[in-house]
Image (cartoon, rainbow, N blue to C red):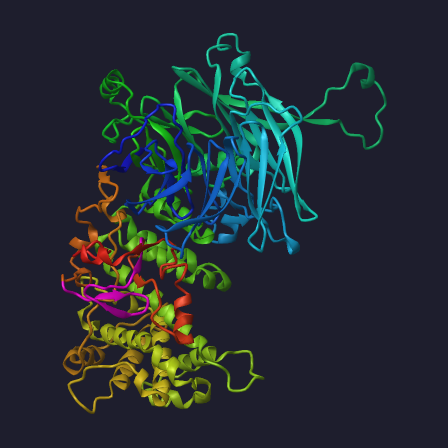
Amino acid sequence: MMEVAYVCEWEKRPKSNHCPSTPLVCAWSCRNLVAFTTDLKNEEDEKGTHHMVHIIDTEHPWDVYSINSGHAEVISCLEWDQSGSRLLSADGDGQIKCWAMADHLVNSWETSLGSAVDGDPIVALSWLHNGVKLALHVEMSGSTNFGEKFSRVKFSPSLTLFGGKPMEGWLAVTVSGLVMVSLLKPNGQLLTASESLCRLRGRVALADIAFTGGGNIVVAATDGSSSSPVQFYKVCVSVVNEKCRIDTELLPSLFMRCTTDPVRRDKYPAVTHLKFLTRENSEQVLLCASSQTGSIVECWSLRKEGLPVNNIFQHRSPVVGEKQPMILKWRILSATNDLDRVSAVALPKLPISISNPDLKVASDTKFFPGLGLALAFHDGSIQILHRLSLHTMGVFYGSSLGSSLRPGDETAIKRQRAGGHTVHFKALQLSWTSLALAGVDNHGKLHMIRVSPSMGQMLDMNTLLRHLLFLLEYCMVTGYDWWDVLLHVQPGMVHNLVEKLHEEYMRQNQALQQVLSTRIVAVKASLCKLSAATAARACDFHAKLLLIAISATLKSLLRPHVLNTPDKSPGDRLAEICAKNTDTDIDKVMINLKTEEFVLDGPPLQSLQQLIQWVGDFVLYLMANLPNQGSIVRPGFGFLRDGSSLGMLREMMVMIRIWGLLKPGCLPIYTATSDNQDSMSLLFRLLTKLWLCSRDEGHPQEPDEPLIDECCLLPSQLLVPSMDWLPVNDGIICKLQGKQPLRQQFGKPYSLPGLNSTAQVEVFSRSPGAQRMDNLRCLHMGVCPTEESKACTRCGCVTMLRSPNKTNAMKQWEQRWIKNCLCGVDCTVLLPPSRYHEGQIPYPI
């Protein structure tokens, strides 16, 4: 049910004042970035010792990015924002810092904002809610409409600007009972205010923050004693006369049931964990009380109940329309038996409904992700408990080596307990789909644990595929990274998942298909990398992403000849005419176009030559390899039946032909064996014949023999380019197919050969002296580039950090990739020139 995927440890553990009571914190973003702290204090300067914040990308866990946080006291809170691009850190001295990516790089962070309540430790921290809430309907998982599976829930932001735009900011709760709010004004200034939670301020040992649909904030707080009440407060934030105003109101409180039980009254004296079940549900809370040897967990729910009426008034004749008065009251939902001592708690982020009818549907469909919460214990084990009933759904028996044991191996469990509890998790976080668990142990090691979507239940393959497909669709709709879903995809599942994902996508309306058009291609590419049988298709999907981007950029340069144009743009008219005209002569297709709409100045055309060259090279490679597509799937196979992509290539060939009349220097360069060879005309003729075979995607035809014979002659007529423009990444996901956990060291890339280096696909081979490619600009950078570059941690695309171009046309192309990579993921890392010389770039050499 749970097994370790990999463990990362420090190569040389620095000296530290290790204290078992030092709290560690961990936070997992929707981009699958994990931020965590350790008790290692290894950065000293004249001002003293500073604590570090470590950030890893789960795909490249060895590349740890350690930030000298500037926090002089122990970091108590880490909190990602909804986009996963900014991080809040707070410490025991009341200092809060806001970290943001510099140049959108995962390994470059800077802080320019912060707030403080000097000397008042922060115990709870949260970003203000932006009003975006999505509901995942498990009961509609069989529906063909994404709008029925995932729906937007009406939810108000914590604070709005003019026009209803949510205002950004954060909220913190301190030990002394203060609530502090910091608001980010549109001009970049920070507006900060603080207020006491209640008139009688008291010590707050633990607190948590949740949000209501009406835009209010609810804070739960306790002084740490199980005999004291757990207090709840409503916090309203507003801006009055350019000043932040905070209003607080006391809500119903509760006493833990274990303190009222005569058997357990003094058994668990301290409240060690206090968490709302979800950040967007302030009516359900999880409490854990502990002693030195054990713990107990309780789940409570806030309900409306009728107020009992005194007997004196029960015989009074009721007024028409009068209703029984209602009050809010906390009721216990469930409680565990006596447990071992709990060391960490992780709650699911998947937004499934947790009402009783929905839970019954989830049980009937056997969809378990998002239903369980994780408890870590001091003996090194982890239990997954149902988030409402708190019954055990699965158990992970950890060991000091980071491996997992079978649930029935009682001898090993006893041996482990007898040997001591040296290794246990002090911080725990579930991923955004609840399919992975990240834990930091008391030795500073990071453990990545798979959490099976079946939760130990016996599921047939179709049901498992349906659940993984459902979560992939959820990631597509939300824009979240899907790395944790890939952890559970075996090579034999890849083909079925890709086909089913395409079928579901084609059932959506045209508007939604257009929004998700590139994202689904990126998901397919990442899936195909997991299997040697489909690795070549991953190349096709990458080429399709680049093709779509180039086509959109080139068409956007076209301008209508006159201002009072019809509804269709020049790009739309080009696509329409090329779709209707089946002539194989490129010059005859040009005649039907208004060539004045294609008139551009010389400099923009010349600056786009490398993109135009890529289009020409790709068409040549595609046609030259048509006869080689046999039993072994080779790159280019996916385009043979893709009529829309072939049609897109035809459109660009026509556009390039017209531009070549204006600026011959922008044309693609071919090495031909004959001086009078019209290479573009030849390639367009062959491409059109292939397009005619596949333009009816419902009933595609096989290429005829004359076409294949002509394609066989291409290598003797033109020099066919190599495929060195395809990126190859060195991520860990392809190396996690086995069940044995991988052990790694921070700062040292894992050297085990992965799928890509062993697959018999020629596009993955790189000679030591091969030219390095800028995969987005389609430029050669030399064997040992001196320019700083950045690389995508998902697809491996490498591109120069600084632009060598000055023309507006090329800058427009480069603007696309400032934040996101070609695959749509915004997880890029800076590659200094030294890493090229050391061979540590994303190419296996």
Instruction: Give the farthest residue toward the top.
Output: 262
Can see residue 131? no
Q: Nearer the viewer, residue 715 or 190?
A: 190
> Is residue 842 rendered to the left or right of residue 523?
left
Q: Is residue 63 above or below residue 221?
A: below
**Between residues 492 and 827, which one lies in front from this camera angle?**
827
Residue 315 image-quadrant placement: top right
* Vertical placement of residue 51 versus 56, above or below: above
- Left or right placement of residue 566 versus residue 429 in this view: right
* Residue 632, position as x, y percentages in the image: 18, 61
Residue at the image point whose x is 51% and y is 15% from the top = 258
Q: Residue furthest front?
A: 46
For residue 507: magenta? Answer: no
Q: Where in the figure is residue 268, as x and y percent of width and height?
A: 46, 14
* Front position in the image: 161 or 138: 161
The part of the chain drawn in magenta is: 769-793
- Asked if residue 787 lies in the magenta stretch, the reply is yes
- The x, y position of residue 206, in whole percent, is 51, 26
